[in-house]
């Protein structure tokens, strides 16, 4: 009989504790599918952050390390020095990466660290119960902006992909979305590209993943997808902000190290 | 045996670490420990190691956490305000049982304070500045030679117990020069680390370095595991030095630099026919409470000498347990107490003018 579906090899059989409609599950699976397809599961080390995905190691069947809030890029820096040939990723939310961990992510990019960061942007703090994140949209209601985020008091949301793309050491920066099957397929291709670039040791790779948080947004999973499309994508445009040229990809580290 | 060489404290610490096979060092500039990262940046790669200048002490301790989780032999260093920033990391290193050696070349505080030496980080070192129930093993050398020895011991203890080990020295020992004998290269004992993150290579289940326990009973069980380890360390790893306890009228208690000032104060007192003794804790955690049982009935008083407002005195009182009056004398804020000041305070306590 023809096999039409198999359980993703890089995912454990553990029952997920993510809320219904949350896109973490999709993001986890895409990363693990890519690593499996590239035959890298046995060479991979991942870092899960403080936030909803602190328990990512329960679901991802690779060596993993938990990080203090915001510190994953520093931990990754240490791990990569010990195992320079491993495939290494950090998986971080917007509170973790764009707020408390800005120093660590900027300087990992600045050093051109040879790992990949998956940045899950759902415009809110999920695990702590829906507080304002640096990525919360103006007017968006959260438990700490109950009348909606005020631009006057809190400024406008941070665009991390655009910021990271200004740093020379970040050789691959792209923003993707998980709002539809076609976006998900596109995202998977981008994930694969990022891992290929890491293997060539060209520099730091950063993928911002626009995601939903139905529970804390107070929307149904389907309405959340629509809200992501109509509210987030206009402010956080999808696309590539930085990538190595064909020659750099062909030459690998020597070229990238210049 | 290797030749005697004259070395500055900070440089000797770095060279000792290299010879005990430290392969990863993450540093951030702060005085008076800058010679450690500078030396490591120059010398560590020659020994197949890696130096990274971190963007902050917070990043440095987390880089160390990563390198340790990956199975590497790691050292970091800082000075008081920088070590304060590393406290989050200390709690995490203990929580996940990641081995690491840390040197705090301490200075006067609080706040920015001064770059001059101080011993005011005793509480932070022995009580912990991070959250939760945890202990660092804390070793306090009194000379550069002893620092070298204790750095070797620190790497061993750290691997053996899977616990961070802090070397607490002050800026005096970090900045002065002394003749020392260095160990041979590759003096470090290595042990297997099957728990380390290496990638499964498809031959074992994934390893996880984790600090979160959502169920209270699971966290309690983990804390019991840590407590049993700490009790074993208390039983096995106390170290201290004593002098003249058998007939001392007054017993000084001091660690590190201050213990050397006391030796000169003891000579001053001896010239005046006053018998004095010394208890010098070498391990500050676990603390050598049992050393106070060695004091004799000829002792009339215990005097704690510290370059702080008096922090270790709390442990001395626990050790003395009401058997003798305990008092304190010290200078702080970067000033250093003189042997004469110590001797005259001892005479005042004994009622000898």
Image (spheres, rainbow, N blue to C red):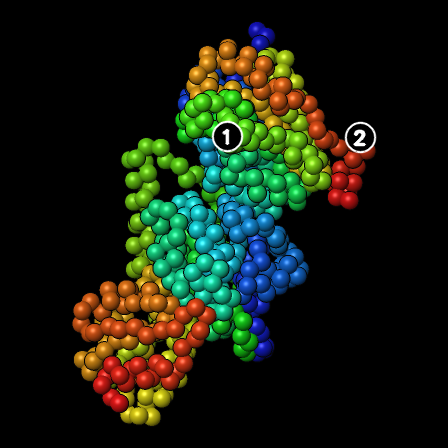
The quadrant of the rendering that contains the N terminus of chain A is: top right
Residue at the limit of the structure toward the right, as seen here: A247
Q: Residue at x 36, y 89 (%)?
A: B268
Residue B157 in the figure: left or right of residue B271: right
Q: Position of residue B135 (x, y in %)?
A: 36, 53
Q: Position of residue B74 (x, y in %)?
A: 53, 54
Which residue is tagged 2? A246
Of labels 1 and 2, earlier in sequence is 1
Callout 2 secondary element:
helix
Callout 1 secondary element:
loop
Q: Residue at x 34, y 56 (%)?
A: B127
Q: Quadrant of residue A145?
A: top left
Q: Is residue B294 above or below residue A92?
A: below
Question: Counting other residues with Cα less than 10 Å from the Cα at mark 2, is it few (<14), some (14-19), or many (20 or more)?
Answer: few
Q: Nearer the viewer, residue B80 or B220?
A: B80
Q: Position of residue B167 (x, y in %)?
A: 45, 62
Residue B93 in the figure: left or right of residue B326: right
Residue A215 in the figure: left or right of residue A194: left
Q: Nearer the viewer, residue A149 or B106?
A: A149
| Numbered badge on residue A133 | 1
Label 2 is found on which chain of the structure? Answer: A
């Amino acid at each position: 009989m023809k096999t039409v579906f198999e359980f993703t090899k890089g995912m454990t059989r553990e029952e997920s504790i993510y809320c219904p409609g949350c896109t973490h599950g999709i993001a986890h699976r895409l990363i693990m599918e890519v690593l499996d397809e590239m035959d890298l599961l046995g060479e991979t080390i991942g870092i899960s952050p403080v936030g909803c995905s602190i328990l990512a190691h329960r679901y991802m069947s690779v060596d993993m390390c938990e990080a203090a809030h915001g510190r994953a890029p520093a931990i990754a820096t240490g791990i990569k020095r010990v195992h320079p040939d491993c495939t290494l990723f950090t998986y971080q939310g917007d509170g973790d990466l764009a707020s408390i961990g800005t120093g660590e992510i900027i300087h990992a990019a600045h050093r051109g660290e040879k790992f990949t960061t998956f940045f899950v942007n759902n415009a809110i703090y999920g695990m702590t119960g829906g507080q304002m994140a640096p990525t919360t949209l103006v007017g968006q209601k959260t438990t700490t902006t109950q009348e909606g985020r005020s631009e006057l008091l809190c400024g406008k949301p941070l665009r991390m992909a655009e910021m990271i793309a200004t740093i020379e050491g970040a050789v691959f920066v792209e923003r993707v979305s998980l709002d539809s099957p076609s976006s998900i397929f596109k995202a998977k291709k981008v994930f694969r590209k990022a891992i290929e670039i890491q293997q060539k040791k060209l520099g730091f790779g950063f993928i911002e993943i626009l995601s939903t948080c139905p529970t804390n947004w107070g929307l149904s999973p389907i309405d959340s997808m629509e809200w992501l499309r109509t509210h987030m994508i206009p402010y956080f445009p999808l696309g590539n902000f930085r990538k190595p040229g064909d020659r750099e990809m062909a030459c690998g580290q020597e070229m990238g190290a210049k | 045996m290797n030749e005697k060489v004259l070395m500055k404290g900070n440089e000797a610490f770095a060279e000792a670490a290299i010879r005990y096979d430290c392969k990863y060092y993450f540093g951030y500039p702060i005085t008076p420990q800058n010679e450690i990262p500078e030396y490591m940046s120059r010398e560590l790669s020659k020994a197949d190691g890696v130096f990274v200048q971190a963007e902050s002490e917070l990043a440095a301790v987390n880089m160390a956490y990563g390198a340790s989780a990956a199975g590497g032999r790691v050292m970091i260093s800082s000075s008081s305000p920088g070590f304060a920033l590393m406290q989050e990391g200390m709690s995490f290193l203990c929580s996940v049982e990641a081995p690491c050696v840390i040197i705090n070349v301490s200075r006067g505080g609080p706040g920015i304070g001064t770059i001059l030496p101080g011993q005011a980080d005793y509480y932070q070192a022995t009580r912990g500045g991070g959250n939760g129930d945890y202990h660092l093993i804390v070793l306090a050398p009194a000379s550069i030679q002893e620092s070298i020895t204790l750095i070797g011991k620190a790497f061993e203890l750290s691997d053996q117990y899977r616990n961070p080990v802090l070397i607490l020295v002050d800026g005096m020992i970090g900045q002065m020069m002394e003749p020392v004998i260095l160990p041979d290269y590759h003096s470090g004992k290595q042990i297997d680390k099957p728990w380390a993150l290496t990638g499964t290579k498809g031959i074992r289940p994934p390893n996880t370095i984790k600090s979160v326990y959502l169920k209270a009973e699971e966290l309690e069980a983990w804390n019991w595991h840590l407590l049993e380890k700490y009790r074993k360390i208390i039983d096995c790893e106390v170290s201290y030095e004593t002098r003249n306890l058998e007939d001392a009228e007054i017993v000084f208690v001091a660690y590190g630099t201050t213990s050397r000032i006391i030796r000169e104060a003891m000579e001053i007192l001896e010239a005046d026919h006053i018998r004095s003794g010394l208890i010098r804790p070498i391990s500050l955690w676990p603390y050598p409470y049992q050393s106070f049982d060695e004091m004799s009935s000829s002792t009339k008083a215990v005097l704690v000498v510290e370059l702080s407002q008096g922090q270790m005195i709390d442990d001395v009182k626990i050790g003395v347990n009401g058997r003798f009056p305990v008092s304190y004398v010290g200078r702080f804020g970067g000033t250093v107490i003189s042997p004469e000041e110590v001797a005259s305070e001892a005479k005042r306590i004994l009622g000898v003018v």
